[in-house]
Every structure is written in structure tokens, then in C-alpha cells.
Amino acid sequence: MQIPRKILKRIINLIVVLIVAIVGFIKVKHPFSYLVGVPVASWVVYLLCNAMCTDILFGETLGCSEKSIYKEK
């Protein structure tokens, strides 16, 4: 049984973002950080994790180039 790439990518993103959000909520001390800091950090981590899963792990491109710079066919 193979897990489709989209589902695997979503699972990896969810796990990474939840870990960052939980650590962020545990470590912050200021109320402003709860409202702005942790959501922004989680969003940035989501974008970076999505890019990492897409290009480095799966060798896909997002339409910005014809082929992946990390994987060769």
C-alpha cells in the first residue's frame, strides 16, 4: 500500500506545524506573542516545510522551473 504524495505531504506539514505551535505556546511569555508571533512562525514553518517536501523529498516543481534542481531523471 502506497500513500499518495499529497496526503504524505499534508501529514508531514501538519506534524511539523503542530510541533512548532506547541513549542511556541509553551515558550512565549508575552500576550502579543500569542496573537501574532506564534501564528506567524507557524505559517513560515508551513511554507518552508511545504517547499522542502515538494522539491527536496519528492522532486516536484511548483511551476517556477521546468525541472527540480535536486532530483535528476
Image (cartoon, rainbow, N blue to C red):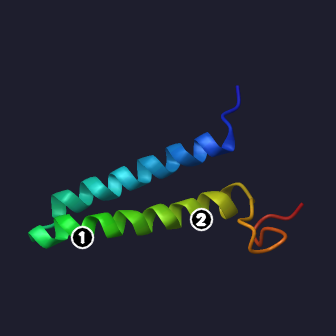
Front position in the image: 1 or 36: 36
Mark nearest the camera among 1 and 2 is 1
Give the residue drawn at x 51%, y 48%. Answer: 12
- The tag earlier along the polypeptide, 1 or 2, is 1
Q: Is residue 67 left or right of residue 56?
A: right
Please name the residue that numbered disc 1 is placed on. 36
| Residue 28 image offset from top left, x and y in percent | 15, 67
Instruction: Check whether the beta carbons of the residues at disc 1 and disc 2 lie within 8 A of each other.
Output: no
Dot 2: what SS? helix
Please name the residue that numbered disc 2 is placed on. 51
| Residue 5 image offset from top left, x and y in percent | 67, 44
Give the residue drawn at x 70%, y 31%. Answer: 2
Q: Which corner quadrant of the image does residue 37 belong to?
A: bottom left
Dot 1: what SS? helix
Label 2 crowd bin: few (<14), some (14–19), many (20+), radius 10 Å: some
User: Alpha-carbon distance for marks 1 and 2?
Assistant: 23 Å
Give the answer, above or below, for where 37 lies relative to 19.
Answer: below
Residue type for callout 2: Ala
The quadrant the C terminus occupies is bottom right
